Amino acid sequence: GPVLVLILGDQLSPAISSLADRTPDDTVVLMAEVADETTYVRHHKAKIALVLSAMRHFATELRQAGWTVDYVRLEDEGNSGSLTGEVARAIARHDARGVQVTEPGEYRLRQAMEQWREDLPVRLRILADTRFVCPLPDFYEWAAGRRELRMEYFYRDMRRKTGLLMEGDKPVGGRWNFDAENRAGPERGASFPAPPRFAPDATTRDVIAMVESRFARHFGTLDEFNWPVTRADAERLLAHFLKRRLPHFGRWQDAMVAGQDFVFHALLSPAINLGLLDPLAVCRAAEAEYHEGRAPIEAVEGFIRQIIGWREYVRGMYWLDMPGMAEANFLDATRPLPDFWWTGETKMRCLSEAVRTTRDNAYAHHIQRLMVLGNFALLAGLKPQEVADWFLTVYADAYEWVELPNVAGMALHADGGRLASKPYAASGAYIDRMSDYCGTCAYKVKVKTGPDACPFNALYWHFLARNESKLARNPRLFQPYATWRRMTDDKRRDYIESAEAFLATLEPAEPGWARG
Ligand code: FAD
Ligand code: SF4
């Protein structure tokens, strides 16, 4: 019989390594929608719709290119509900002589595949995922023997390796990093480009109807569903980004504006993570905008750094530190996730906005994720595993290899500082500087303690105080700890009491939102 090539839901790339050495005449491609993958966390409805619609479109694309595709739908009779089950059924159905697959992005599935080696009646080949710039063995080599694994140094290697924004062995513009230019707050009167509309075709409409009925109780709405589900639509989104957003991307990268859910961000992570766009090609297209004089260096460098720097780096760190990363809890944070993370019902304007856009779009931009949601989780001492489940559930771009290092490492310092040299902890003043939220918030950002004060203010000191034994030696926290120690006892007590009064009001979430 033929060789069975299993293509996973986030492997929707014609150049995927599992197909590279195959020819259509001797291959059956298996794609399977399985209940296990749609419900192991109860994903946002829009995330399920996106993945399933993109899979169905990709199957069509493969068939048009001459491949035989055996596509198992969620609602098909006999669907075993698991990938393991579907591979076994397909081997029998096609009398396959072997199975091959590109390595999955999740540790959980990688472990399951090791077991397949034992259990399947035929040989299994697992191939490296060549859609990343940095192969995992190269990352392990980079990490070996280094005391500190800082993204910035890794990023420079990726610049040298790809030649992106390089003049010989020197960075274009004379500096590797232009972040100092990228910290503008919101400006009055600015206007923002509307993303292109991707009207759902018949396939997407079918999937949306199925998700509405089958996953009715999952978080999120489908009313605003507007993600590209084909390569052609993803290219259209990229073209829009290059023209309308990239030139302003840098300056606005850290800004938050009420009611403006996308600011100048790319919105490309769902398409890139699914495989609809190639990350390196995206970077080369952005680089060309700089060379053509259509986008400034700080925007293009900042954007390219997010992709060949951060994105590649967190992936390497994930595989380096799993399975420990999923259990890590350096700060011993144990508070359950508050209910308002699902309902959005809080008087804190910054957080209600973040939850609202998440529910409407399965999206929030980076600073909302890091400095509003992540910062709150860090300061309030929310349990990292509950926070990680939430992030994995709610975002259209969330796959564990990229979500977990960002949550546990970058936002929550649960890894003790392997990813980030200091916790991203900030009081209300930071959010006020970077957003227009505070002016319309029920809390007062300039008030430090008491019931009207912005909760971030007292939580910030509560966080530092309760973690003093673990964090006070961090040189980057020397200044805040010195300030804390200089305060009068009364002032310190006010902060602690205010923070505790606020924390006592948090209602834990009902069970079952993330894991059913
Ligand atoms: P832009 O801001 O326009 O950035 C451009 C591209 O750079 C993105 O499309 C993405 O591919 C890449 N990128 C930027 N920052 C990162 C980063 N820190 N890590 C990896 N790639 C990055 N990203 C995900 O793809 N999936 C997640 O599940 C995810 N969870 C996150 C959780 C937290 C707590 C934080 C702080 C960040 C998380 N990120 C995640 C990273 C980042 O927030 C998103 O990639 C970004 O918001 C996606 O929107 P965009 O395409 O508009 O990004
Ligand atoms: Fe958020 Fe505090 Fe500003 Fe309200 S005052 S929006 S809680 S930072």
Image (tube, rainbow, N blue to C red):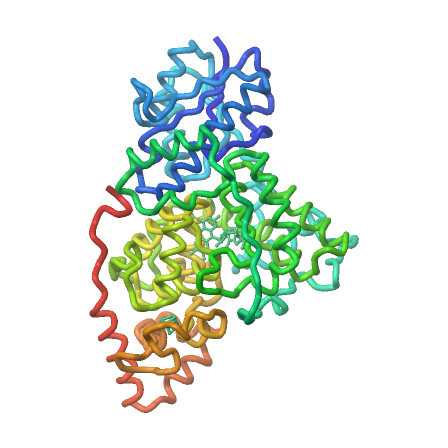
Q: In the current view of this chain or complex, which residue is farthest to the right?
A: 168
Residue at (38%, 43%) from the top-left corner?
A: 222
Side of 28 where 178 appears, left or right: right
Horizontal and vertical percent position of residue 92 = 38, 11
Residue at (71%, 51%) from the top-left corner?
A: 289
Quarter of the image with the C terminus in it: top left
Residue at (40%, 41%) from the top-left corner?
A: 47
**Nearer to me, 201 or 41:** 201
Quadrant assignment, res 203: top left
Side of 6 where 253 appears, left or right: right
Position of 21 relative to 487 (above/below): above
Q: Is residue 144 visible?
A: no
Residue at (48%, 65%) from the top-left corner?
A: 257
Position of 269 relative to 177 (above/below): above
Horizontal and vertical percent position of residue 108 = 37, 38
**Nearer to me, 330 or 288:** 288
Horizontal and vertical percent position of residue 413 = 40, 62
Q: Is residue 139 visible?
A: yes
Horizontal and vertical percent position of residue 458 = 32, 77
**Nearer to me, 331 or 435:** 435
How many badges with numbers are in the image? Answer: 0
Side of 307 where 209 appears, left or right: left
Side of 497 where 72 appears, left or right: right
**Nearer to me, 62 or 263:** 263
